[in-house]
Image (tube, helix red, strand yellow):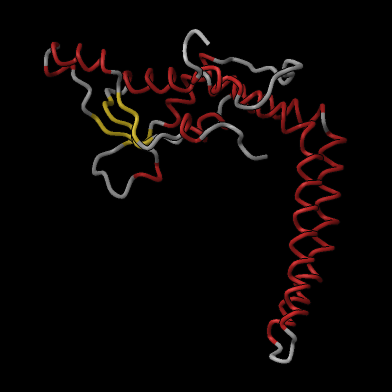
Amino acid sequence: MKSLLKSAALAAAIALVPAAANAQAAAAPAAAINTGVAVANLEAAIANSAAYKAAITQIQTTYKAQITAFQTRQTALQNEMTPLRTEIETLQKNPATPRATLEAKIAAFQTKGQNAQNELQRLTMPFARPEAYVKEQIGAKVEQALKAAMSAKKIGIVLAPEAVVAVQGASDITLDVVTQLNALVPSASITPPANWQPGQADQAAAAPAGR
């Protein structure tokens, strides 16, 4: 199931301690300044948190019929698409294939593929929505968990794994973030409010004050 959390909120390339904390550090003894560099995979931290794992188990039990229906239909659609793809590949290899024929086959294949994708997306909604709600609840505490892990390990800069080419002496604090998340979010509900939509919390946080 795809994550519906915004990557900017979960896996920022560089996470710096707040300006206020930096100001305090500037006035503190040199030994107290956090100067370490580390990496952290925040999406992995959420997925490995106790609350997320427990919620996913609950979702798999509660929505077992819907998940099975999705998997069955997904397999059927893949079986329908495979011979069509093979036919197109065969036509492409044949120099005698009329261009109009090939283009028509490709267009039909793309249309069928898009329809299949739309159908599968509808089938995932019953269990994808609860999962997105679970991730949003845990994701709301990721920044707090990251800052706590950074303080505990005396880390001043955290990089996302994909942003690192080579950093000598860097450590991975993903598991430390998991530990902090487990303390901050012991459990998560799999029942979204009736009017809840994925990303709603992010939109509310980004809205100008007073609106």
The quadrant of the rendering that contains the N terminus is top right
71 horizontally vs 5: left or right: right
153 horizontally vs 69: left or right: left
In this view, which residue lies farthest toward the top? 210
Count of labels in the image: 0
Residue plotted at (44% across, 20% down) = 145
Q: Nearer the viewer, residue 88 or 166?
A: 88
192 horizontally vs 23: left or right: right
Residue plotted at (26% across, 13% down) = 20
Up-down: is 62 above or below 121? Answer: above
Residue plotted at (50% across, 20% down) = 181
Residue 149, given in percent of the width and then of the height, sits at 38, 22
Residue 102: which quarter of the image? bottom right
Residue 7, given in percent of the width and then of the height, sits at 50, 35
Residue 204, given in percent of the width and then of the height, sits at 55, 17
Residue 79, given in percent of the width and then of the height, sits at 83, 62
Residue 138: which quarter of the image? top right
Residue plotted at (14% across, 11% down) = 28
Up-down: is 36 above or below 92? Answer: above
